[in-house]
Amino acid sequence: MKAVVMNRTGNVDVLAHVTRPDPVPGHGMVLVQVAVAGVNFMDIGVRQGMAWNEMPNPKTLGVEGAGRVLALGEGVEGFAIGQRVAWVYAPGSYAEKIAMPATSLVSIPDGIDDKTAAAVMMQGLTASHFATDFYPVRPGDIAFVHAAAGGLGLLLTQIVKLRGGRVIGRVSSTDKVAVATAAGADHVIVDSEGRFAERARQLSGGEGVHVVFDGSGPTTFQGSLDMLRRSGTFCWYGSVLGGPGAIDIMSLPRSIKLGYAVFSDHIPTPALLRAHAARLFGWIAEGKLKVHVGGVYPLADAARAHADMGSRATTGKLLLVP
């Protein structure tokens, strides 16, 4: 089978489209023919040496996708050969085939295509965690969403709106405003230098926002603090762009609450994974949640997808097709 591997840590030139042996499903595992694989900032972090360092090179990248069941390992129940499935956090998804634990899989309902299913797993479950668990958005809440035209930002904006909240989005360029607005953002701030806090406070009536979702790295950290109202919540996520450094907890202003949100805490069991994925699929089927695919690349062009994502010029979700 064909797969995309990284031979060493580094820039996109460390990625190679190679032939590897077909995987064999062991006990409790399922072999899947990959139809679509999702591209995530996490994959860039792995390529740059920020994760998976315990795994020897060359290693196959990717953690998310959709496809059809090819074979079942011993002890697997609840899945059938030919069934359409999607998954999240199954290392090795940049490939034509992948063997993974059955516990990582969800069934794709009729009416949801493979690209949509693959595109909503990592970012959809993350957005769901942020807006329903980490900070359960209430009607009238004002949320600030960084990178509002990205795959996660677009889904998060829609879920906040589904729960009755208002959204102030931040995008890095004017050509992304329309995409963020179409997802439901009530206001969109164009900013690439971290100068957004004052405008956000103005748009929130001078009191500040109830919650800010920030995965944009250390350059936005102080501005996100500054825009929060009393007892507001700071949802920090993502590690690819680095953290804010050491924090003196006694320096945090206005009794705010600060936390690091990790999507895996939303789906700690297979039952929760399937329940939350089913809710996302239900919203999509009902037309309440729209998935914006910003680019589809052949698997062999994974390096180009990484370069495009790293440039911050893309919107929506990027996908690879074997």
Image (cartoon, rainbow, N blue to C red):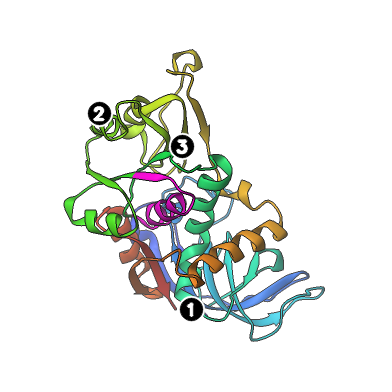
Q: Tell which of 177 and 81 is nearer to you.
A: 177
- Main SS of the magenta part reads helix
Quarter residue 298 falls in: bottom left
Question: Three-letter amino acid code at disc 3?
Answer: Trp
- Locate residue 307, reporting x and y percent: 30, 59
Residue carrying label 3: 236
Q: Nearer the viewer, residue 254 or 9?
A: 254
Label 2 element class: helix
Amino acid, disc 1? Asp
**Residue 224: mark in rendering:** none
Name, please, the residue furthest toward the right. 75
Examine the image and state in which quarter residue 203 appears. top left
Q: Is residue 6 visible?
A: yes
Q: Which mark is residue 113?
A: 1
Q: Is residue 43 depicted above or below 247 in this figure?
A: below
Q: Which residue is at a point 68% across and 57% down the rendered structure image?
A: 272
Q: Quadrant of the C terminus?
A: bottom left
Start and end of the magenta stretch? 150-167
Q: Which of these two is toward me, 244 or 150?
A: 150
Q: Is residue 235 left or right of residue 226?
A: right
Q: Which residue is mark 2?
A: 198
- In the rendered view, tell whether residue 73 sits above or below residue 238: below
Q: Residue at x 47, y 16 (%)?
A: 248
- Determine crowd level at label 2: few under 14, some 14-19, many 20+ residues with C-alpha closer than 10 A: some
* Residue 71 x/y as whole percent: 69, 82
